[in-house]
Amino acid sequence: MVFSDHQHYLAGGFLETTRPLNLFGRARQLSKLRCDVKARAGATEVQSIANASESLVRWLIEEKGLPPQRADVTAVRPDGSWGAFANQDVKEGEAVMELPGDLSITAVDVAGHGDVASLADGFGELTGLALWLMAERQKGKASEWNVFLDALPESVPSPVFWPQEQQQELLRGSKVLKEAQERAAALQMEWAAIQERVSADPSRYDPAVYTSGRFQAALSVVLSHAAYLPSASCFVLLPLLSQVQRSGDDTAAVLDYDIQKEKVTLTASQPLRRGEAVTVFDGRPNSELILATGRVEDDSPADHLTVSVGLVPADRMFSTKKEILKNLGFEAVQEFPVYRERMPIQLLAYLRLARLTDPALLAKVTFEQDVILSPANEYEVLQLLLGECKTCLGSYEGGAEEDMKILQQRDLTAEERLAARLRLAEKRVLQSTLDAVRRRLAPIRGVPTKTGKMTDPNSDLLEIFDVIENAPKLPSKLIGGFMSWARGEQDPDWKKKQPPR
């Protein structure tokens, strides 16, 4: 899982800057970004972020010798993420930005840090980076990374760190609530283990510095800004690149480590024209983004929810179906993603197999194409999905319209706005899936019977009309009985309903 920063769009738009941050001597106003500053940060705080980021750019160029790049940083947004734009045409596969490996902070730096090496020993990479961040921030101006640290936020408002009451109130109905609570509990256990080491050696680890609050703040920043480099198999904090805007669009540039160049490289996934925005690919859904980064990306192509489905243990074909799924790489209980813009074929295929009752249809099962096994089977599968979507939507207090109205309010807290955007994104995914299922149900005329065949849902009425049409052919006693029933005379309460004569 890549832990990386993501742009947090505010209801009011973007921050307007008076001039761009010229990254490598190419000062151009490529874009004016505006926002209602009061929605997230005061003018003083925004200016502080701008000053810190400009200092970082200058530090990289003048003191670290960073050569000219193919992109410039042009603006700072209130959430601390930065805008980057190509300053020349870039071909697909070319490096947009490169950072020498010695400017990255990894577990190697944690292990070589005299203050926190022993404290971080045995913990994960991200925890180690958080402890490194705490130690370096304590040094203040004496830290060789001070300029970079000043450009990072003090903390990130992930729901993991919200009070439990706030989690319950703002995340009700969302599956993020349970995950946030579980991660918060795991975080408490992690800190308890660290605190034991701090308490055992207070002369080395100042208890006033290594506190639960500071650890949570540092970890929230690490989770939000660290990236995972597949080629180096490690998490890393990166000056400049850690703060560039992220996107769920798979055409965004890819961040990784180039072993031959010994540089962290941001590579274009498609041609970029001069002046075009540069973003870093982050394929996580909003349910993960909000927990790791305290942000939600509106209309992200990568956004999805997950549904859990499984075989029926009492099914007489359970063992056969389980073996088929095993050969295909699936489990007897499996999670599948549900997207806003497309119906997952493999989810449908799994459910079709799970609800199949006719062994003769096993040969038709495929996870590669959208193949209906039988009308009755398809009806049952779609009804299951329909019910699941309705249940999930019903777990929220209101519909999407309510959240849209909430987001129009200007006095929301950052947490209230973030939660409303998450709920809205989730409801849109569920409603989109619900609509898609209904469209698939429309052509299936009928309902399944015990025999597995389909019957017209209006068959009872059709039988009545058939009887009426054939009434002259029936015995008079039968006709009289039918007409008595049709008039309601067979209803035990019928006479009670008649007005007195």
Image (cartoon, helix red, strand yellow):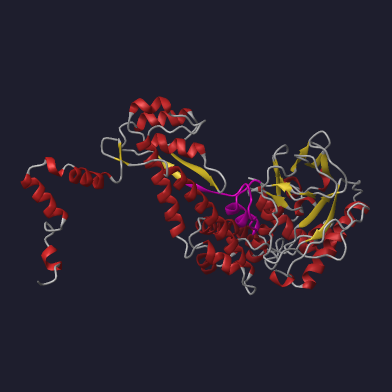
Question: Would residue 100 be seen by someone viewing this image from the given angle?
Answer: no
* Residue range highlighted in magenta: 283-307
Measured as percent of width and height from the top left, residue 366 is found at: 47, 29
Magenta segment: does it hold 491?
no
- Is-magenta flag for residue 304? yes
Q: Quadrant of residue 196?
A: bottom right
- At which x and y percent is residue 262? 82, 38
- Left-right relation of 357 to 183: left
Q: Residue at x 75, y 52 (%)?
A: 242
**Relative to 173, residue 103 above or below:** above
Q: Is residue 234 above or below residue 116?
A: above
Q: Nearer the viewer, residue 107 or 374?
A: 374
**Residue 30: horizontal and vertical position, in percent?**
85, 56
| Quarter containing the N terminus | top right
- The x and y percentages for residue 485 are 13, 54
The answer to whether 255 appears left or right of 467 in the picture is right
Q: Residue at x 9, y 50 (%)?
A: 481
| Looking at the image, residue 18 lies above or below residue 70 | below
In the picture shown, does residue 96 fall above or below 211?
Answer: above
Q: Nearer the viewer, residue 450 or 328?
A: 450
Residue at the farthest front position: 472
Name the image quarter holding residue 55. bottom right
Can residue 391 be seen here? The reply is: yes
